[in-house]
Image (spheres, rainbow, N blue to C red):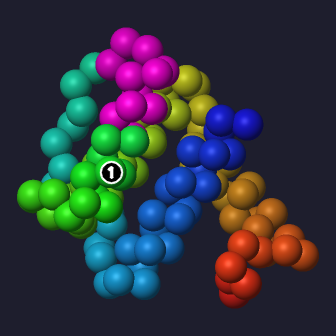
Amino acid sequence: GIPVEIADLVIRVADYCGKKGVDLELQCNRSPEPEHTIDFEEWLARINYALSQAWAGTIPGTEFWLGMTVKYAFRTASACDIDLWAVIKEKTAYNRTRSYRHGNKRI
């Protein structure tokens, strides 16, 4: 469901940042706090926007927008009463036992 998809997004962004040497925690901490958002669809739109900006290399930079993507993901989860850290841990544990991994990923 939605919690697992949000967790998967955060896991994939974190994996990408790890491979590229991006300090994701630093980027999350330096990105501004998003203003209050009323509905779930707007949070999803913000996640999509930030990830699109990261992909496009838009100023202030890919690293900044990846941090915003993760920050928006956590804010979305919070707004929906989802314990995202718990879902990330569950998803990570599940991924370790999967017989099929997209792209032949190693864990």
**Residue at the spot x=50%, y=56% of the render?**
10
Q: Which sits in the foreground, 11 or 101?
A: 101
**Residue at the spot x=50%, y=73% of the render?**
15
Q: Is residue 34 left or right of residue 90?
A: left
The residue segment tinted magenta is: 37-47
- Taking 35 as reference, is 85 above or below it? below
Q: Which sits in the foreground, 37 or 88?
A: 37
Counting from the top left corner in percent of width and height, residue 50 is at 30, 46
Counting from the top left corner in percent of width and height, residue 105 is at 68, 82
Q: Could you tell me which quadrant the N terminus lies in?
A: top right
Q: Is residue 40 magenta?
A: yes
**Magenta stretch, overall SS:** helix
Callout count: 1
Circle 1: is it few (<14), some (14-19), or many (20+) Cα within 10 Å?
A: some
Counting from the top left corner in percent of width and height, residue 88 is at 63, 54
- Taking 11 as reference, is 74 above or below it? above
